[in-house]
Image (tube, rainbow, N blue to C red):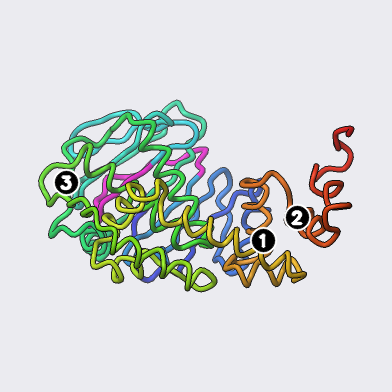
């Protein structure tokens, strides 16, 4: 795996010509050409001490090396052979790779013509931060490095993409707690075990009130944990048991209702999005269509026209496919 360098810039990119469009989106990245290979390496803003790598190789072998970090990698396409602590195995889209700090490892692509993967590197600072979020003194270690678990692979792939977008801290925080919680719980050995949150209606009432009052502001999982006097892990569990969804999903519900109220009052789409707590109008549009099956513009027009004319705007976002009444 790619060596971690503390003095690297926040993002370090080696682009392939065919991925030039991807690189152009990240104008602040340092870049140089390495024909046939692409890699992006950066430091997480959410979890201090966590580095991330997104690589797409057509030919590359890693010489034997070690990391002073936990390494977790999920393959998106192709495959490679990885030797870790004397055990060699194949990684592909059906396998997640996990390595403890200081374990000697190397990798080769062999007959594979492509290896595209996403990796996490957790230094001691990131490990300590995770331990705090789970309310344990030490996180577990792992006895096996090649794990076949489709659910876990999907969770870490989604987490990596969320951290790459870096546009929704609460969602990324939840995904991190749930992905690492599943990994530690299913395959970890030793370390502490996170305790479930108590069923406390008073605590839940305080959390819901906080989210309603601050829905238009930045609300983090740490904020909720401090208010509840619980760990981040316990807050997620409490929400799932009490209201059936995660804190992020509940906050979206509050923000969607707030956006509807602002649109009904005649506010513009952009004003309504920001007043409801969305980062921009595009984010509101996405969640509107996903939740209600219509766009905010359709909703606003229907609210403006009233009972006599609203229906014609609320039927279909694509007028070319509008059903006949």
Earlier residue among tags 3 and 2:
3
Residue 297 drawn at (x, y percent)? 78, 57
Residue 115 drawn at (x, y percent)? 47, 36
Residue at mark 3 to residue at mark 2: CA–CA distance: 51 Å
Residue at mark 3 to residue at mark 1: CA–CA distance: 47 Å
Q: What residue is rendered at 65% in x and 49% in y? A: 17
Q: Secondary structure at mark 1?
A: helix
Q: Does the magenta portion include 84?
A: no
Q: Which residue is mark 1?
A: 260
Q: Is residue 305 left or right of residue 169?
A: right
The numbered mark at residue 299 is 2
Q: Secondary structure at mark 3?
A: strand
Of the 4 image quadrants, the one containing the C terminus is: top right
The numbered mark at residue 291 is none
Q: Does the magenta portion include 59?
A: yes
Residue 308 drawn at (x, y percent)? 88, 52
Q: What residue is rendered at 22% in x and 63% in y? A: 132
Q: Is residue 95 left or right of residue 133?
A: right
Highlighted magenta segment, given as a residue range: 56-73
Within 10 Å of disc 2 (Cα), the crowding (few <14, some 14-19, many 20+) is: many
The numbered mark at residue 141 is 3
Who is closer to the viewer here, 120 or 295?
A: 295
Earlier residue among tags 2 and 1:
1
* Front label number (3 vs 2): 2
Q: Is residue 164 left or right of residue 110?
A: right
Q: What residue is rendered at 55% in x and 51% in y? A: 34
Residue 176, compared with residue 143, is above or below; it is below
Residue at mark 2 to residue at mark 1: CA–CA distance: 8 Å
Residue 191 drawn at (x, y percent)? 12, 50
């Amino acid at each position: 795996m790619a060596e971690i360098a503390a003095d690297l810039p926040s993002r370090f990119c080696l682009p392939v010509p065919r991925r030039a469009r991807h690189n152009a989106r990240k104008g602040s990245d340092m870049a140089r050409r390495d024909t046939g290979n692409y890699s992006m390496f950066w430091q997480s803003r959410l979890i201090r001490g966590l580095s991330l790598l997104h690589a797409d190789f057509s030919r590359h072998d890693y010489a034997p090396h070690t990391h002073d970090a936990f390494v977790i990698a999920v393959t998106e396409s192709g495959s490679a052979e990885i030797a870790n602590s004397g055990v060699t195995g194949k990684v592909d889209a059906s396998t997640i790779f996990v390595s403890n700090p200081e374990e000697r490892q190397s990798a080769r692509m062999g007959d594979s013509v492509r290896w595209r993967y996403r990796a996490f590197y957790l230094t001691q600072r990131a490990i300590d931060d995770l331990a705090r979020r789970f309310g344990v003194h030490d996180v577990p270690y792992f006895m096996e490095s090649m794990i076949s678990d489709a659910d876990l692979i999907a969770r870490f792939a989604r987490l990596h993409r969320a951290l790459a977008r870096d546009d929704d801290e609460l969602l990324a925080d939840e995904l991190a707690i749930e992905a690492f919680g599943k990994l530690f719980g299913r395959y970890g050995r030793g370390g502490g075990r996170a305790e479930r949150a108590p069923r406390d209606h008073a605590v839940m009432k305080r959390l819901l009130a906080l989210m309603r009052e601050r829905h238009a502001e930045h609300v983090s999982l740490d904020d909720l944990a401090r208010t509840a006097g619980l760990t981040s892990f316990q807050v997620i569990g409490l929400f799932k048991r009490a209201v059936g969804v995660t804190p992020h999903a509940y906050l979206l519900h509050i923000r969607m209702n707030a956006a509807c109220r602002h649109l009904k009052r005649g506010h513009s789409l952009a004003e309504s999005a920001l007043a409801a707590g969305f980062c921009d109008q595009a984010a509101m549009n996405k969640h509107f269509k996903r939740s209600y099956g219509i766009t905010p513009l359709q909703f606003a027009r229907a609210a403006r026209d009233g009972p006599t004319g609203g229906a014609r705007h609320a039927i279909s976002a694509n007028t070319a496919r509008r059903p006949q009444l």
